[in-house]
Amino acid sequence: MKLFTSLALVLALILSTTTHVNATTIKLNNNIALGALNLDQGFTDFYGYGSNIRYSSNTGYEANNALVMFFAEYNNNLALFVLADSANSTGKGKAKFSVNNLNDFGNIIFKDDTSDTNITNGIKWAWASKRNDGLVFQLNDPNNFNLDIAITNTQGLGQGFKFLSFDASNQVTSHNFTQANSLGEFNIATIPEPTTIAVLALALFALAASRRKA
């Protein structure tokens, strides 16, 4: 009976750490929580390249003369969308987007066009008037990543950078950052939720107690 109890506690411990798909909070610069947009279609389809608007993204979250970033979730997969400018903008632009150790955390599964230049840990863009640029970066592990993002060599992004956050109903909140010296540096990382930590601690305590009684 004691063995059965111990095994049950071990099982509870394992479940508490593996069945919480959304057991983490995504934090921007360690203080802004970012909720993901829930999708009912794949990431590339949602990007909408060539759909109604030629050679540009068509998500509905693009912004003139700004670089917009947000997370989207589909079938328990998580991706970072990065959208540079908008097809409604009349100005051309450029930017270099990179993530420190990008390949350690995921892969760029879509880039806007073949003329985008691959660089170490990222992409260099150049877009024309009435066009935009962008990418989709899918995370290997939605619950464990730490991204140091750098946006440099920018032109045509006078409205700066925007991070979008979504609630459970996909209502959006925009966090805006002004552009300084054509440079944007951000950290986005997962942080375990306190409730998850508490459940884990409780399971460990119960397991230790059962061993002492045995």
Image (spheres, grey):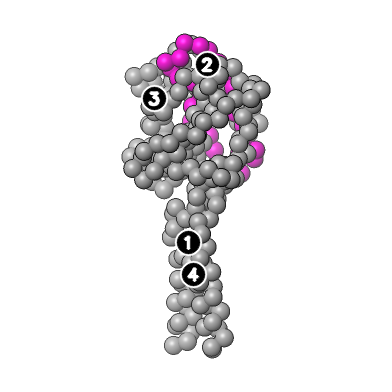
Is disc 1 in contact with disc 3, using a CB cutoff of under 8 Å?
Answer: no
Is disc 2 in contact with disc 1, using a CB cutoff of under 8 Å?
Answer: no
Question: What residue is disc 4 on?
Answer: 13
- Which residue appears at 44% of the width and 77% of the height? 8
- Mark 1 vs mark 3, CA separation in Å: 37 Å
Q: Which image quadrant is residue 27 in?
A: top right
- Which residue appears at 38% of the width and 32% of the height? 46
Q: Nearer the viewer, residue 136 or 196?
A: 196
- Mark 2 vs mark 1, CA separation in Å: 45 Å
Q: Earlier in the sequence, mark 2 or mark 4?
A: 4
54 over 83 or under it: above or below: above
In this rendering, position of residue 167 left or right of residue 191? left
User: Which amino acid lies under the numbered mark 1 shown in the image of this protein?
Assistant: Thr
Q: Which residues are magenta?
A: 82-110
Q: Earlier in the sequence, mark 2 or mark 1?
A: 2
Q: Nearer the viewer, mark 1 or mark 4?
A: 1
Q: Which mark is residue 127?
A: 2
